[in-house]
Image (cartoon, grey):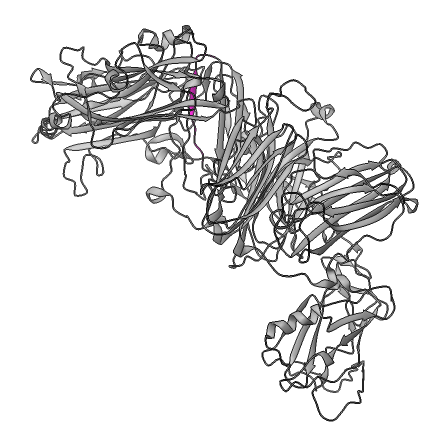
């Protein structure tokens, strides 16, 4: 009977060929038996898994239903045997299941075990099954399964209607064997044919069209973007004639739309400032912000007025931090509409160079006819200095009703307890004026008197108006010894105050109470004196500085004693009221800390070891489910990282360095170390444990940090390479292996007399019955060579659950075994051996259990291998690049996505093809299907390089052939065309949301300027950071604090600056997140900047611009971090 959906045309003859397979079993009329199997009687595709249903006449009984499934495999109750190739062992199913009634058994045999043109017999040992009454099932005859005779090279399926073994091909491959592409298509990778590219017609909207690696590539002009140059770049409007867009509608011409800084107000008498929502006047206002600073005319000045009127007598204070531009503020009273009639009330022209400009005065007000005032900002710009399109200016301003201020002043005496108290007076820590506070190496010092203690600024009657009042200081000294190597002292001091009536600032002086040399001009010419000020935040002043960098001289004959004086001062004195200060005691609070931090090695373009592996930016176990990071870190004399766990968690690390190091793993709960070992230079070491809930620590100590391998001179940048992984125990797969694929995957027999061989495979290793001891052989293979040969062997496994050692042994018959090659590379889920074998004879490849593992790990582990053996003459003396690895072909291998839907990795030394023109370089990604559904986000970043590296993402799912994204002509193009001072280009980044099941290609294109072609070598490398993450995991924190606020920290730093803080920014689809920091130096200086981020969520890179020469330095890419490390930079203005 035909199915209902089939409709036959009348009066038409149809022929339906039928293959009839009849088996007749003579059995007893009573008792349980096997009714048969489905499907049967057809040709089966050897490239597809074979799924079979076994039908029982009545339910099979078992005390535990799951035990039936296990018994089928463990006791070989059901299996296939070949009838042609009798040397092949029996094949067991890889999956077994049953229905609820226990009358049907569902088994699956892997296509990996099936051979074309083979005839298999399925044996069911039915007498081993019983029904509920204890009766055994009758024996059954074998069932026959014929495999089709086609070979489709994994790119198609056998055509069931073909008698000659032809294939039905996929992805535009051509029959009969899917080995070549259809006409008009070309191959990319091993599994796809895509249509040949053409620029006729031009798909680039009239802009440049090129063919790159057989794909259309549109090269957009500046101001355009998109795969086909079909839209204006951000900040441009008017497609197809794109032009810059400005905020002219806001009255500030020239401010680009991607500038997030607020605009300076033109009036304070508006809602939200001096007016309430209902339009009534307020008696107070306090604002502090980094405002957008418009560009003055070249060599000229920019003037901006902020107008306001007052209903009552008020106190007024305004403060502007100095920028690289010369900023002066003045306060005027407007007597008429003509500014010429205005009266100057106060000006900051006499302010000290390099200090903030402040105006502090009392203003009259009137409810009937409020006086009109305006604050004028005058910005003078040196034409020789560059001016950024989004420059900012830190402005703080406060207005307070005079009566209210006097009422607050009446409480000041009680706040100060009558007599102004000062922090850290000599009597508080030493009785002798000549014996300052001593802080010894590695000893922390904290001064925090608590919230109930308030200090006071002494009254300043008789002091010069509008001049600084240095009202207090104390001296301290740092004593260092060899025990403090690798650590530097850092001072953090913070003072809080009421900005309007009692602003207090801090100044750190190198030396003992001199202060005369703290003028900015004198500092520039006096190497023996150096003073550092802090930064203003609303009602706070913060000074954070590395004391080693702030030290300019030693005020003691002892070599390692440094003396400093911390000054407290009012930038301007308090106002007088009736002949005396408003406040007899202006209250403030103060805290201070001196801590010892790891010293940044400013010569190293590498990151520091993160302070935590579980609660650090980008390494968050709770947010991402697991942690896996591989990177090269700066080797310091001592460093540690913490691990905070809320549940039982698997932990593993491996480490390799050219220095002897000791490693210890300890627990906060105390007791003996969980692990302690010395790792010799160049040998590497690893450790595995299932850690309990709690806090644990990994400490790494350099034993010989000043001597490199072979006793050579001290290395300027000592490093170590480490791989860390953490995974909750509940997320570790504990399934057992299917016996049919355990250790059966081995290369064919081989002798180099037959030429060369290449072999790759995916299979499983069973560790269930393994005796856990170092060196236990898990897999091996013997081969014979007849002359000098090269072996290249790559092994991919899951690092945390199944990372093993690999080695090559010389094993001639009757002689001792000799290890001739081992894999010691610390790479993400990957190890390899490359060795040239000079002697003829028998060799053996081995996968062995590494040291540091003495507990039961995952019982069944997937493994991938790629093996190449060839006579040495085949290589033709080619160059081997041991510190590199090839560009991966796919991200769906066990190494990356594998059995997961998430990964993040930095591949720091990928090999650039020798022939850039002929190279076909692409990485394929099949969009994963996240556990919780939805899309997955792909992020890719190629690090800076002197060879220009461009990325392109294509959807190559048949029949599509679409360029989705390409770099080199987007917003970054403003800077991409500018190599830095070392002729290195900044990196390129791609971000895309992938659909499940669609196939993508991440194309990589390299180019070298003609005049630099001669600089190329066979071992040029580039870095590529990659991550794939389900969208659901990235949306846990959509809004930053403050309802979508952004905090970039201070935007200016001075000599000795030490800044370590958690920052955040609100993501925007329209505006790429960015900020600027300004550095002005009067002497040569070093700088180390490290920014860390969760790479799956965001990517940040750093550039340092010399504003005089307009030259750039770009950061190095590390795992989840960007590092900018430079030495001996010339004095000047930097951004």
Q: Main secondary structure of the magenta part?
A: loop
With respect to residue 148, does 712 lie above or below?
above
Is residue 740 highlighted in magenta? no
Residues 226 and 77: in front is 77
With respect to residue 971, does 1124 lie above or below?
above
Residues 846 and 22: in front is 846
Which residue is at a point 65% across and 28% down the rendered structure image? 658
Q: Residue furthest front?
A: 671
Which residue is at a point 62% across and 48% down the rendered structure image? 854
Can you give x and y, in whole percent of width and height, for residue 873 in the image? 88, 36
Can you give x and y, in whole percent of width and height, for residue 368 in the image? 7, 31
- The quadrant in which residue 686 appears is top right
Count of all numbered marks drawn on residues in the image: 0
Q: Can the viewer see residue 714 in this picture?
A: yes
Quadrant holding the N terminus: bottom right
Q: Can the viewer see residue 967 in this picture?
A: no
Residues 332 and 70: in front is 70
Residues 505 and 443: in front is 443
Q: Which residues are magenta?
A: 1074-1083
With respect to residue 916, does 341 lie above or below?
above
Can you give x and y, in whole percent of width and height, for residue 875 in the image? 84, 36
In the picture provided, is 94 more to the left or to the right than 994? right
Can you give x and y, in whole percent of width and height, for residue 845 in the image? 79, 46
- The quadrant in which residue 72 appears is bottom right
Which residue is at a point 46% across and 12% down the rendered structure image? 1083
């Amino acid at each position: 009977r035909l199915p209902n959906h089939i409709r036959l045309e009348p009066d038409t003859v149809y022929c339906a060929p039928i293959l009839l397979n009849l088996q007749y079993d003579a059995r007893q009329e009573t008792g349980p038996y096997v009714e048969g199997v489905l499907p049967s009687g057809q040709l089966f595709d050897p490239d597809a898994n074979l799924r079979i249903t076994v039908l029982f006449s009545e339910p099979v009984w078992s005390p535990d239903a799951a035990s039936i499934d296990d018994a089928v495999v463990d006791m070989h109750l059901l299996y296939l045997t070949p009838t042609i190739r009798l040397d092949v062992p029996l094949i067991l199913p890889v999956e077994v299941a049953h229905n609820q009634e226990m009358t049907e058994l569902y088994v699956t045999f892997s296509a990996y075990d099936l051979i074309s043109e083979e005839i298999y017999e399925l044996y069911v040992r039915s007498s081993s099954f019983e029904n509920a009454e204890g009766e055994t099932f009758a024996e059954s005859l074998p069932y026959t399964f014929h495999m089709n005779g086609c070979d489709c090279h994994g790119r198609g399926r056998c055509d069931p209607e073909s008698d000659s073994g032809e294939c039905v091909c996929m992805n535009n491959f051509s029959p009969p064997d899917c080995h070549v592409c259809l006409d008009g298509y070309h191959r990319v990778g091993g599994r796809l044919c895509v249509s040949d590219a053409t620029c006729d017609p031009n798909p680039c909207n009239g802009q440049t069209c090129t063919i790159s690696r057989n794909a259309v590539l549109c090269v957009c002009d500046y101001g355009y973007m998109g795969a086909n140059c079909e839209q204006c770049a951000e900040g441009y409007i008017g497609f197809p004639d794109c032009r810059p867009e400005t905020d002219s509608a806001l009255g500030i011409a020239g401010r680009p739309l991607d500038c997030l800084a607020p605009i300076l107000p033109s009036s304070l008498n508006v809602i939200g400032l001096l007016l309430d929502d209902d339009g009534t006047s307020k008696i107070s206002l306090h604002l502090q912000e980094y405002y957008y600073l418009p560009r003055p005319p070249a060599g000229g000045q920019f003037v901006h007025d902020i107008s306001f009127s007052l209903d009552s007598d008020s106190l007024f204070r305004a403060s502007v931090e100095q920028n690289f531009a010369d900023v002066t503020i003045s306060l005027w009273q407007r007597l008429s509409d003509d500014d010429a009639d205005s009266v100057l009330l106060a000006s900051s022209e006499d302010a000290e160079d390099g200090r903030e400009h402040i105006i502090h005065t009392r203003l009259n007000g009137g409810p009937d006819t409020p006086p009109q005032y305006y604050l004028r900002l005058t910005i003078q710009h040196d034409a020789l200095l560059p001016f950024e399109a989004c420059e900012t200016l830190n402005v703080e301003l406060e207005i307070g009703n005079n009566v209210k201020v006097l009422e607050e002043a009446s409480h000041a005496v009680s706040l100060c307890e009558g007599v102004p108290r000062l922090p850290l007076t000599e009597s508080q820590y030493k009785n002798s004026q000549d014996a300052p506070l001593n802080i010894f190496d590695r000893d922390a010092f904290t001064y925090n008197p608590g919230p109930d203690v308030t200090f006071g600024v002494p009254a300043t009657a008789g002091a010069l108006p509008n001049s600084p009042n240095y009202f207090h200081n104390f001296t301290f000294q740092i004593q260092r010894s060899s025990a403090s190597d690798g650590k530097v002292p850092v001072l953090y001091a913070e003072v809080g105050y009421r900005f309007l009536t009692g602003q207090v600032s801090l100044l750190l002086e190198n030396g003992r109470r001199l202060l005369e040399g703290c003028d900015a001009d004198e500092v520039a010419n006096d190497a023996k004196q150096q003073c550092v000020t802090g930064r203003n935040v609303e009602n706070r002043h913060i000074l954070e500085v590395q004391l080693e960098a702030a030290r300019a001289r030693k005020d003691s004959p002892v070599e390692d004693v440094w003396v400093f004086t911390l000054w407290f001062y009012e930038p301007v004195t308090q106002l007088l009221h009736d002949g005396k200060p408003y406040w007899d005691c202006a209250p403030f609070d103060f805290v201070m800390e001196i801590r010892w931090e790891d010293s940044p090695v400013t010569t190293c373009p590498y990151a520091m070891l993160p302070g935590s592996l579980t609660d650090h930016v980008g390494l968050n176990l709770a947010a991402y489910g697991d942690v896996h990071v591989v990177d090269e870190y700066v080797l310091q004399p001592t460093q540690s990282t913490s691990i905070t766990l809320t549940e039982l968690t698997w932990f593993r690390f491996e480490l390799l360095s050219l220095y002897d190091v000791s490693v210890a793993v300890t627990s906060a709960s105390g007791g003996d170390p969980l692990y302690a070992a010395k790792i010799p230079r160049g040998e590497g070491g690893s450790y595995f444990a299932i850690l309990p809930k709690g806090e644990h620590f990994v400490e790494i100590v350099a034993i010989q940090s000043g001597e490199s391998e072979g006793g050579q001179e001290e290395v300027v940048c000592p490093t170590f390479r480490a791989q860390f992984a953490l995974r909750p125990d509940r997320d570790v797969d504990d399934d057992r292996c299917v016996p049919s694929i355990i250790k059966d995957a081995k290369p064919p027999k081989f002798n180099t007399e037959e030429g060369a061989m290449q072999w790759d495979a995916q299979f499983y290793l069973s560790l269930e019955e393994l005796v856990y001891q170092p060196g236990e052989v898990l897999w091996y293979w013997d081969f014979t060579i007849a002359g000098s040969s090269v072996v290249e062997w790559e092994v991919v496994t899951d690092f945390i659950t199944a990372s093993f050692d690999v080695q090559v042994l010389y094993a001639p018959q009757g002689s001792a075994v000799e290890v001739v090659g081992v894999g010691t590379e610390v790479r993400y889920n990957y190890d390899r051996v490359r060795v040239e074998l000079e002697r003829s004879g028998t060799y053996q490849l081995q996968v062995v259990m590494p040291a540091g593992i003495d507990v039961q790990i995952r019982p069944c582990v997937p493994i991938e291998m790629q093996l190449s053996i060839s006579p040495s003459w085949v290589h033709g003396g080619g160059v081997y690049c041991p510190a590199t690895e090839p560009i991966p072909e796919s991200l769906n291998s066990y190494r990356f996505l594998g059995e997961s839907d998430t990964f993040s990795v930095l591949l720091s030394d990928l090999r650039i093809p020798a022939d850039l023109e002929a190279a076909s370089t692409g990485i394929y990604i099949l969009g994963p299907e996240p556990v919780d559904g939805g899309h997955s986000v792909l992020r890719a970043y190629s690090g800076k390089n002197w060879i220009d590296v461009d990325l392109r993402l294509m959807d190559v799912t048949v029949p599509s052939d679409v360029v989705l994204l390409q770099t080199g002509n987007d917003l970054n193009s403003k800077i991409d065309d500018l190599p830095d001072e070392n002729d290195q280009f900044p990196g390129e980044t791609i971000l895309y949301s992938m659909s499940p099941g669609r196939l993508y290609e991440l194309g990589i294109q390299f180019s070298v300027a003609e005049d630099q072609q001669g600089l190329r070598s066979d071992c040029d490398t580039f870095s590529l950071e990659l991550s794939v993450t389900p969208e659901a995991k990235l949306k846990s924190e959509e809004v930053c604090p403050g309802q979508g606020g952004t905090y970039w920290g201070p935007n200016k730093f001075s000599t000795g600056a030490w800044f370590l803080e958690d920052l955040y920014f609100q993501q925007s689809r329209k505006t790429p997140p960015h900020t600027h920091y300004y550095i002005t130096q009067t002497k040569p200086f070093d700088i180390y900047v490290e920014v860390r981020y969760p790479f799956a969520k965001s990517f940040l890179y750093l550039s340092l611009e010399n504003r005089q020469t307009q030259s750039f330095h770009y950061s190095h890419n590390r795992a989840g971090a960007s590092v900018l490390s430079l030495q001996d930079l010339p004095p000047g203005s930097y951004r």
